[in-house]
Image (spheres, rainbow, N blue to C red):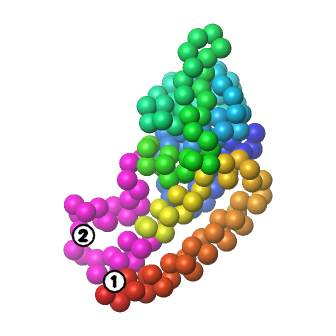
Amino acid sequence: MHLVFLATLILEETIIRINKTTDYAIRIVLYLAQQKRIVSSTEMVNVINISQRYILEVAKKLNENGYIDVVKGMNGGYSLSKPPEEISMYDVFILMEGPLLFLPFLRKDNPCEEISGTLHDWYNFFQRVIECYLRSLTIDSFIMMPIDTWRTRIIDDLNDLLSQQKEMYRIFTAR
C-alpha cells in the first residue's frame, strides 16, 4: 500500500507543486498498475483515499486520453490501457496540468523583459532538465522499486542528468 502514495511523498519534497487532480491521477494510475486487474471505484475510494466524485472525474480524463479503460457493468471498474512502462510521470502531468511551466515567465507569450538573457537561459535549461527527468520516470519504475530506494535514485538520476546536460548548457549559454 505504501507505493500508492509514493508520488505524493516524493513530490512534496521537491520544488514542483501539483494540483490535487494531478495527485489523484498519479495515485489512480499507480494503483491500477499495481493491481493488474479491473478495479472498482469503490475499492479505490477505500484504498487510495480519494472521493468517488474525484475518482469519476479523473478517471474520465484518463480514459478519454487512452491511459485507462472503463469496464461497465456489475463487475466493472478501471484498468490500465497501456503497459505501465509506456506511461511516464510527464504524460500524467501534461494531461492533468497542461504544459509544465514551473517558471511562468518562460511562456512564449510572456517573454518577461526584466530578466537578463543569461538568467532566462538558465531558467529555460532548468525547465528542460525537469521535463526530461519526468519523462524518464515511468509508472513501472515506481511500482517496482521499494520506497526506501527512491530518494537515493532521484538524487543519483538528477546528478547523472545534470552531468549529461552540462556540456549542452555550456554550448547553449555561449551563443
Residue 112 circle label: 2
Q: Residue at x 32, y 65 (%)?
A: 106
Q: Residue 131 appears at what percent x and percent y? A: 47, 62
Q: Is residue 49 above or below residue 89?
A: above
Residue 129 circle label: none
Residue 24 highlighted magenta (yes or no): no
Q: How many marks?
A: 2
Asked which quadrant contains residue 68, the reply is top right
Q: Is residue 164 above or below residue 64?
A: below
Compared across the picture, whether 102 is left or right of 78 comes to left
What whole-number distance in Å separates the C-alpha atoms at marks 2 and 1?
Answer: 13 Å
Compared across the picture, whether 150 is left or right of 70 comes to right
Question: Mark 1 is on which residue type?
Answer: Thr
> Residue pushed farthest top?
74
Residue 125 highlighted magenta (yes or no): yes
> Residue pushed farthest bottom?
174
Local crowd size for mark 2, using a 10 Å CA cut-off: few (<14), some (14–19), many (≥20):
few
Q: Is residue 50 visible?
A: yes
Local crowd size for mark 1, using a 10 Å CA cut-off: few (<14), some (14–19), many (≥20):
few
Question: Mark 2 is on which residue type?
Answer: Cys
Q: Is residue 76 above or below residue 123?
A: above
Q: Residue at x 64, y 22 (%)?
A: 40
Q: Is residue 174 above or below residue 158?
A: below
**Could you tell me which quadrant the N terminus lies in?**
top right
Asked which quadrant contains residue 113, the reply is bottom left
The residue to which callout 1 is attached is 118
Q: Residue at x 37, y 53 (%)?
A: 99
Q: Residue 62 appears at what percent x and percent y? A: 49, 35
Q: What's drawn in magenta, residue-wise?
A: 97-126
> Which element is circle 1 on?
helix
> Which element is circle 2 on?
loop
